[in-house]
């Protein structure tokens, strides 16, 4: 089943590319509502107005997501006192899968469910992992598509505070 998802999700996301916005640096980050695994509803930008936010799209089958999400946790722990928020949006998987994965990797920032990949499409995500660094003004300051190291995440997060 995971192998099938590994093949299908990127194809589904890519097939939507024609209608998906090309979200780039300088663009306003699209608003969304999502649910945490505990049922709490989160709205962006409403719940995060005036705060820098890292929006991370991931799935448990993504070979780079686990390690990078742990690296993001390190950055989050160093930067959260400066107001940094992290939202880990799971693209296309169910609640049980998300809960099991987040428990396994032990990060403290919240996971959000995007079971139909609607938010991912709105953001123009065509591959996982994809990370957007959104300033307190709601504007995308930078993005990372694919694998990155901790220093890259740290640099982008620090730039949000400027």
Image (cartoon, rainbow, N blue to C red):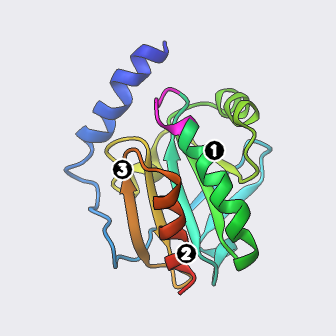
- Residue at the location (43% across, 22% down)? 5
Q: Tell me the crowding category of disc 2: few under 14, some 14 to 19, or many 20 or more residues within 10 angstroms, Cα based.
A: some
- Residue at the location (31% across, 45% down)? 126
Residue that badge 3 annotates:
125
Residue 27 magenta-highlighted: no
Q: Position of residue 23 (x, y in %)?
A: 32, 65
Q: Which residues are the magenta region?
A: 61-66
Residue that badge 2 annotates:
158
Q: CB atoms at circles 2 and 1 under 8 Å apart?
A: no
Tell me the SS state at disc 1.
helix
Front position among marks 1 and 3? 1
Front position among marks 2 and 3? 2
Q: Position of residue 135 (x, y in %)?
A: 51, 79
Residue that badge 1 annotates:
70
Visible residue check, residue 19: yes
Q: Quadrant of residue 3?
A: top left
Q: Is residue 111 above or below residue 27?
A: above
Q: Tell me the crowding category of disc 3: few under 14, some 14 to 19, or many 20 or more residues within 10 angstroms, Cα based.
A: many
Q: Give how far apart the Cα atoms at labels 2 and 1 are.
A: 18 Å
Q: Give how far apart the Cα atoms at labels 2 and 3 are.
A: 23 Å
Please name whichever residue, 12 or 25, is drawn nearer the observer in this view of the structure.
25
SS assignment for the magenta stretch, majority: loop
Tell me the SS state at disc 2.
helix
Q: Tell me the crowding category of disc 1: few under 14, some 14 to 19, or many 20 or more residues within 10 angstroms, Cα based.
A: some
- Residue at the location (48% across, 17% down)? 2
- Residue at the location (34% across, 42% down)? 127
Q: Earlier in the sequence, mark 2 or mark 3?
A: 3
Q: Quadrant of residue 141?
A: bottom left
Q: Position of residue 48 (x, y in %)?
A: 66, 74
Q: CB atoms at circles 2 and 3 under 8 Å apart?
A: no
């Amino acid at each position: 089943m995971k192998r099938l998802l590994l093949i299908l999700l990127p194809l589904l996301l890519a097939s939507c590319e024609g209608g998906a916005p090309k979200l780039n640096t300088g663009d306003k980050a699209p608003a969304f509502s999502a649910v945490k695994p505990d049922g709490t509803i989160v709205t962006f930008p409403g719940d995060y107005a005036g705060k820098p936010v890292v929006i991370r799209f991931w799935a448990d089958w993504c070979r780079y997501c686990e390690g990078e999400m742990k690296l993001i946790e390190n950055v989050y722990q160093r930067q959260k006192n400066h107001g940094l928020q992290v939202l880990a949006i799971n693209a296309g998987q169910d609640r049980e899968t998300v809960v099991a994965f987040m428990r396994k990797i032990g990060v403290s920032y919240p996971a959000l469910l995007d079971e139909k990949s609607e938010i991912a499409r709105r953001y123009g995500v065509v591959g996982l992992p994809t990370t957007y660094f959104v300033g307190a003004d709601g504007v995308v300051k930078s993005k990372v598509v694919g694998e990155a190291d901790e220093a890259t995440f740290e640099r982008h997060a620090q730039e949000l505070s400027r």
